Image (spheres, rainbow, N blue to C red):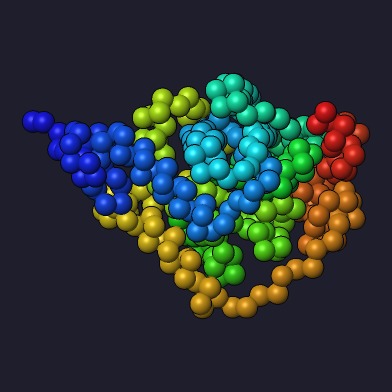
Amino acid sequence: MAPPLCSACASAPAAALRPATRTPVCRACFIAQFEEEVHATIVSASLFAPGDRVAIGASGGKDSTVLAYVLGELNKRHNYGIELLLLSIDEGIAGYRDDSLMTVVQNETDYNMPLSVVSYKQLYGWSMDEIVKAVGLRNNCTFCGVFRRQALDRGAELLGATKVATGHNADDAAETVLLNVTRGDTARLARCASASTGLSGDRAAGDEGEVSSLPRVKPLMRTYEKDIVLYARFNRLKYFSTECTYAPGAARGHVRDFVKNIERLRGDAVMSVVGSAEDMHVVAPKTTAPKLGKCRVCGYLASRPVCKACDLLRELDRKLPGRRAESASAPLNNSEAAAAFD
């Protein structure tokens, strides 16, 4: 049986179904719709301004690969007037990150965007493989999340970036909403579905309470993961698709399975969850933003006397006290980080 005609142009055979509406679309119409939807998110949330120097958090996975490609296309088409850079974080996970970085190097050539890489080992004196050996698999994602967020900020600052763009999509947002529900964190629940943090001068806390020194934007915030996979496929984009070695035991993985199961029953479930979080500002309790200063250990931006990264490094020092002389007991300060980065 012949495939149905595209619901948009009514002339070409359909090549895919949109996940939320189940409407059939051809390849050309899908690409056009996808790009227009991302553009609409950028415009409606005022994510960029002319002259912005945007560091794209590039992991080599589908989300960041599609983000880099589509921002390059939209920047040319709509004349955003922004400069795009690729910034990769090497967590030090053998057989995973070293392989994915090869994809990012290819992206640098394919998309004509300069690439810079900063590693946990450079900044903190520890790789994730070493951290897991010290703490096990129970809390390793906490260490990685805090270190990665700060590493992105530090790398972006050293590049002279004005904003950091990440590939978080609608499915990621729905998972974060549900994780915050399980934690009873209504304050974070009200803002986790936003397409940006820090654009109005605030420095919103991350999932573990750390803060960002630069505004963060998520142009794919209202884009389904399935659409991202299709867009990459239709444009023949090369990306790395292996899951992190240490991810299977993480709480987010269980929430992700739940979201996928609900989505099978109801196509628009993902955006319904995200939309519920967007409405939470109506009922969320008023909270006072923490006063920001500098960590007394490493001198980096912090909302308390000692930043979360330094707290975690001290925990590692307690577990392996003999290793203190071999590794940094605090993140590098700004001048040390700049030297390592160069």
Query: Is residue 327 found left or right of 256 in the rendered image?
Result: right
Tell me what residue is drawn at x 90 percent, y 39 percent: 335
Q: Is residue 198 above or below residue 14?
A: below
Tell me what residue is drawn at x 77 percent, y 41 percent: 160
Query: Is residue 38 found left or right of 120 in the rendered image?
Result: left
Point out residue 260 in the picture as x, y percentages from the top left corner.
36, 48
Report whether residue 181 is seen: yes
Point out residue 240 in the picture as x, y percentages from the top left corner.
50, 27
Point out residue 73 in the picture as x, y percentages from the top left corner.
50, 36
Q: Quadrant of the N terminus?
A: top left
Point out residue 54 in the picture as x, y percentages from the top left corner.
65, 42
Front one among 27 and 216: 27
Report whether residue 322 is seen: no
Query: Is residue 82 found left or right of 283 in the rendered image?
Result: right
Q: Is residue 111 above or below residue 304?
A: above
Tell me what residue is drawn at x 53 percent, y 37 percent: 76
Q: Quadrant of the C terminus?
A: top right
Tell me what residue is drawn at x 36 percent, y 37 percent: 31
